[in-house]
Amino acid sequence: MTTAIDGQTFKLVHDDDGGQHIHDKTFTNCVFDNCTFAIPRDLHSRSTASHLKFIDCVAASSSVGPGLIDEVIIDGLEVRPILLLWSPFLRHVTLRGRIGPLNINSIPTFVNLTAALTASFAEARAAHYQTVDWALDIREGRFEGFSLSGVPASLVRRDPVTQVVVTRMKASSDGWKTVVPSWNSHWASVIDSFLNDKYLADDAELILVAYWDASKKRFQRVVDGLRNLQDIGVAELD
């Protein structure tokens, strides 16, 4: 049975030790203020969030660590200033409606993080995604900012017009930089930042998402920039 939670504010709620299981809840018009979820001590103390819905909620100065996020729908999310997710294990997570700035990282971060722990989470995350039919659905999201690493692009359900894939292999070639037009400098700089990330593997993939804009003209310009990257061969063709 699903529990409905409407209009509540959660302040300074922290899952510092992990091991929690939050499930079968619908949060509507709720505020999460300075909260953290799934910050485990190690792989065995990961928390799980399953069968949850978040409708028109607010995430303020909050973050999500390397827990299992399974069968979760986020429909409209105001974010202040950015929502960071650190190496989450995603399965059937849907983002739709207007979504504030979101950054899904491949690196876990929590107290006493070591190289050995980082490696163990990376191995476990890779094994997890080998068992998943799809991880993330962003087709109906209107994003104010979006960055994703650590989740295979093949497991992300995308809108092929406004959400395109760039592989590190293609981005590392020099040819495209000489032909990308000056009006498309925004996406060129995003790809450069991707290439300069020392934590990413050689086979890393980047999903470029056209950010939502109230101006149809500006939004179309960003979408045209994605098509231009496909035309010059640095972005994948769907």
Image: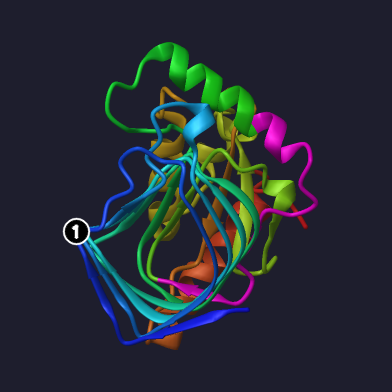
Helix, strand or loop at label 1? It is loop
Quarter of the image for residue 193 reads top left
| Magenta-colored span | 126-143
Query: Camera-side residue: 48 or 202?
Result: 48
Query: Camera-side residue: 3 or 128?
Result: 3
Tell me which residue sits at (54%, 44%) in the image. Answer: 179
Give the image location of residue 17, x and y in percent. 35, 37
Tell me which residue sits at (69%, 37%) in the image. Answer: 128
Read off the residue under disc 1: 12
Give the image location of residue 2, x and y in percent. 58, 79
Q: How is the image coloured?
A: rainbow
Q: Residues within 10 Å of mark 1 (few under 14, many from 20)?
A: few
- Please indicate whether residue 133 sits to the left or right of residue 135 in the image: right
Point out the image quarter for the C terminus: bottom right
Up/down of 80 relative to 173, above or below: below
Query: Camera-side residue: 150 or 110?
Result: 110
Give the image location of residue 102, x and y in percent. 40, 59
Give the image location of residue 208, x and y in percent. 53, 55
Quarter of the image for residue 1 reads bottom right
Number of residue marks? 1
Is residue 140 on the magenta stretch? yes
Is residue 136 on the magenta stretch? yes
Q: Identity of the amino acid at label 1?
A: Leu
Is residue 236 visible from the viewing direction of this image? no
Up/down of 154 relative to 219, above or below: above
Is residue 195 visible from the viewing direction of this image? yes
Query: Camera-side residue: 25 or 89?
Result: 25
- Please indicate whether residue 16 sits to the left or right of residue 190 in the image: left
